[in-house]
Image (cartoon, rainbow, N blue to C red):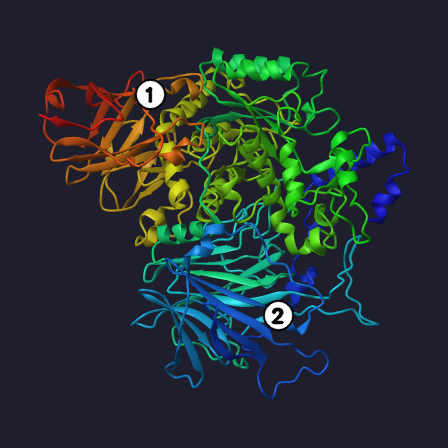
Amino acid sequence: MVAVHVMKPLSLCFQILLLLLLAVSVFSWKKEEFRNCNQTPFCKRARSRKPGTCNLRASYVSVSDGDLVAKLLPKEGSSEIEDPVKPLVLSISVYQDGIMRLKIDEDPSLDPPKKRFEVPDVILDEFSSKKVWLKRFKEETLDGDSSASSVIYLCDNYEGVLRHDPFEVFVREKGSGKRVVSINSNGLFDFEQLRKKQEGDDWEERFRSHTDTRPYGPQSISFDVSFYGADHVYGIPEHASSLALKPTRGPGVEEFSEPYRLFNLDVFEYITDSPFGLYGSIPFMISHGKARGTSGFFWLNSAEMQIDVLSSGWNSDESSKLMLPSDKERIDTLWMTEAGIVDAFFFVGPGPKDVARQYGSLTGTPSMPPLFAIAYHQCRWNYRDEEDVYHVDSKFDEHDIPYDVLWLDVEHTDGKRYFTWDRTLFPNPEEMQEKLAAKGRHMVTIVDPHIKRDDSYHIHKEASEKGYYVKDATGKDYDGWCWPGSSSYTDLLNPEVRSWWADKYSLNNYVGSTPHLHIWNDMNEPSVFNGPEVSMPRDVLHLGGVEHRELHNVYGLYFQMATADGLLKRGDGKDRPFVLARAHFAGSQRYGAIWTGDNSADWDHLRISVPMVLTHGLAAISFTGADVGGFFGNPEPELLVRWYQLGAYYPFFRGHAHHDTKRREPWLFGERNTELMREAIHVRYMYLPYFYTLFREANTSGIPVARPLWMEFPGDEKTFTNDEAFMIGNSLLVQGIYTERAKHVSVYLPGDQSWYDLRSGTAYKGGLTHKLEALEESIPAFQRAGTIIPRKDRFRRSSTQMENDPYTLVIALNSSQAAEGELYIDDGRSFDFKEGAYIHRRFIFSAGTLTSLNLTPSSGSKKYLSDCRVERIIVLGLSGGPNSALVQPGNNKVEVEKGPLLLLETQGPSVLTIRKPNVRVGDDWSIKIL
């Protein structure tokens, strides 16, 4: 804070120079700029505790308001002379579909100094209606254990158990008694209670030049979580690390290895294979094993968190007082946070998709994006002016490369004032947007959370007058530095402030905007150049006296939420918004897309993008991707081409680059490289119907678009640590190429059925690793036998111009000569699909006949009609030599011939093709091959 007040009297030129120096320091990632565990007191304390040191027991167990409740008291004979421990309140709730909730907090009747923060707005309102009201519990003594336990019903196959002394909570299978997930099995639970400051108390914490005042003393919580029958654990994004989380403590791990950190930070050119925290924090972990299946654990807490994954044998210290459970086949983890309460959820699975659905029912499924948003985006910091925009747009057309969205970064504004335009560079923004829209294209502009402290800037003036800014520890409007220089930040915890911010996106308030304009929220961690760890001080105050330390990780969610609400208001609730954000938390999936931040143009960042995208998908953030080409640096043409070939399968597909890099639009690298990038982008457009169908599946179920192989093949151990290949839905497998000048690539194809190469149609046997030639034209990608994939094969300028194009169905037959697939269609723009205005078809091929079945409910108040037809049907793996096909209804006979698998192939293999069967995609019909 002192540094900011010193800056104010300085000359404008000196302020600008200082800002540039601050920005340079931010954009030179240094390990010493960020705290490690030893420099984070709560983490250091929690890691120093020995197993079995928790001295709390559960007492006064009863059922109240449908919950199992108890008091956690120190064991008899234990003494806390200097700091007596007050009882804690524990409650266990049960919800439908195998979800158990555990809450532990200070007892409000004992008058704590303040109410500890509970994260609002993340859990769906309707989730409370799924509560199973407990009426009773049973007491029992566990085998080999003299302590009593309280057992409650969870669902048909599972029970929840509260062990009394020492206190422990776990889920177990009925009948077998096998555990699934537990808390405090290793006795590491600790809860630092709030205190009133007494004379002599020194609670200040210092890091570099920053001091944290800590008015209520240390208030951290830590506990161990164990996953039983697990081979690996996954999740807790965001980290640039492997999909299967590596141990951070115990035998075989470096002595000073860091925990996985969850603390939203603006990190420049982050290093790979690291547990260091990045832009988002989702405290959700999934375990998976061949023996037990899948389970999950989520801690609803938005303070800084550190999580250790403990290697086998970590607790073998003979001096430990620990009483281990008999089932030792498990993975232990240690969860540590700075503040908040215990509000934890157990998910029983037992399959990967079951856990995805259970978590989605709690925090929400991904919003259904507009169709254009899942096509290709072109972005750069920055396109200079309107002439530059028109030039780039025309070049895409000139080179026959489709795209849907052009982006503008911060330089398009008037002096870094958001919701404004630099009228010298962009004199006619409405006309510019309308010209793009005439081609079916859209524009995205950036709006960040820092507001320039300029009395002539209407948004700052209004926010200041209304008291909408967060306050520093002295109660004044917090003043930090970001792109505009001296800046303040709105208190988005306050619903009134979020509503006010949403109103700024109206066409009247955002002058120069149109309905074709969508929004990019960057720097929303929040990023503060002169703040501790390039962020906001932890003692900054929000609504109701909530300290920033308590809600830091949810701030970015609130910013994206307010923006999405603003675009909804702008369109009177009729149009689906598109909002991309960098910082995120559990629930962010309901408001738009995220990306993996400021990556680099190197092969390691290409490789690590896959586990990062997959990990986000496991935590319901399905609409995600990495900057194609790398944000920083200048990729060599081969790397850029390989990135486009991989990025075409990211759920969010955007090319982006820093302003200090060379221009890298796809036509700038020679004719051959342009051709290769064009083909990669065309592949994405060809599969848009399949991607859109998967986004609808994610919207209804929470199951991600991009999936780890083990999500589709949960019993195949070879898939558990494979994060170089991934599934798109249940039908496509993609293997990236991550090395320069690769001649060959090894691809493991799971399962016992064949896989068909997407370009050649060649069948490869499942259950084997295949060594394939690394082709220049594409990365390895395969369609799974037994599936049907819808495509649109005509090349257009944008997805909007494809709306009425016909479909191609690609049928990949399995060993039973059968296949199934689905197609979902709606208007791609509105929310009418919620009222039944969509087409949902299931295609089934069996006994030589392809049948189209209707999955659209008849009860919807609205309908969606399409005159689109099926233009081609391609059949892979059909035995025999058919000559014709019979189409019903109509009894029409059509010829069966040989044709190309991909239209972009000028010369390629021929496959069995039924041309122009002339059936409408929304109708019931059947086609029998004769």
Q: Give the mark toward the camera: 1 or 2.
A: 2
Crowding near the residue tagged with mark 1, few <14, some 14–19, many ≥20 C-alpha atoms within 10 Å:
many
Asked whether residue 907 is in view, the answer is yes
Residue 327 position within the rendered picture, expressed as x and y whole percent measured from the top left? 38, 73
Q: Secondary structure at mark 1?
A: loop
Q: Which residue is mark 1?
A: 793
Please determine whether, in this image, residue 825 is positioned above or below residue 215: above
Q: Amino acid at mark 1?
A: Asp
- Residue at left offset 41%, top offset 31%: 832
Crowding near the residue tagged with mark 2, few <14, some 14–19, many ≥20 C-alpha atoms within 10 Å:
many
Residue toward you, 400 or 369? 369
Q: CA distance from mark 1 to mark 2?
A: 59 Å
Asked whether, in this view, residue 623 is left or right of residue 407, the answer is left
Asked whether residue 721 is in view, the answer is no
| Dot placed on the residue nearer the N-terminal end, 1 or 2 | 2
Q: Amino acid at mark 2?
A: Phe
Please determine whether, in this image, residue 236 is positioned above or below residue 651: below
The answer to whether mark 1 and mark 2 are in CB contact below 8 A is no
Q: Secondary structure at mark 2?
A: strand
Q: Which residue is mark 2?
A: 191
